[in-house]
């Protein structure tokens, strides 16, 4: 993200050693970043669309900054995008013999 490049993607593996499990806030921020890049928006244009100062957008895209999900939801809505969430399937319980 710092370099302004696309995020790496490796197939659609659901498990295995090449799969990364990220915190939900990081995943949400990455979705905002990717959507912003797809739209061709700079941080400045994004800030203007959200009605926020540019440094607030920098915080929103900073993976170490504790952003509020409400802001992320608003950002995605301004870009007419959604945050897809995959819920894990529950594991089958083993019955005692």
Image: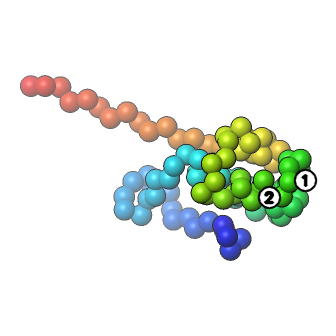
Left or right of 22? Residue 4 is right
Q: Residue at x 61, y 57 (%)?
A: 63
Q: Is residue 72 visible?
A: yes
Q: Pointer 2: residues within 10 angstroms few (<14), some, or many (20+)?
A: few
Left or right of 86? Residue 49 is right
Q: Quadrant of residue 42?
A: bottom right
Q: Residue at x 67, y 42 (%)?
A: 68
Q: For the view shown, which residue lies furthest in the top direction?
A: 96
Q: Residue at x 36, y 58 (%)?
A: 16
Q: Quadrant of the C terminus?
A: top left
Q: Quadrant of residue 45?
A: bottom right
- Percent position of residue 5, x then y: 68, 71
Q: Which residue is mark 1?
A: 48
**Secondary structure beneath label 1:** helix
Q: Which residue is mark 2?
A: 55
Q: Is residue 80 visible?
A: no
Q: Quadrant of the N terminus?
A: bottom right
């Amino acid at each position: 993200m710092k370099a302004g490049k696309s995020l790496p993607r490796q197939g659609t593996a659901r498990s295995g050693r090449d799969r990364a499990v990220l915190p939900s806030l990081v995943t949400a921020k990455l979705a905002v970043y990717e959507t912003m890049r797809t739209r061709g928006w700079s941080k400045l244009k994004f800030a203007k669309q959200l009605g926020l100062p540019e440094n607030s957008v920098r915080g929103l895209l900073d993976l170490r900054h504790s952003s509020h999900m409400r802001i992320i939801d608003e950002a995605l809505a301004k870009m007419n995008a959604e945050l897809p969430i995959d819920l894990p399937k529950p594991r089958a319980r083993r019955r005692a013999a």
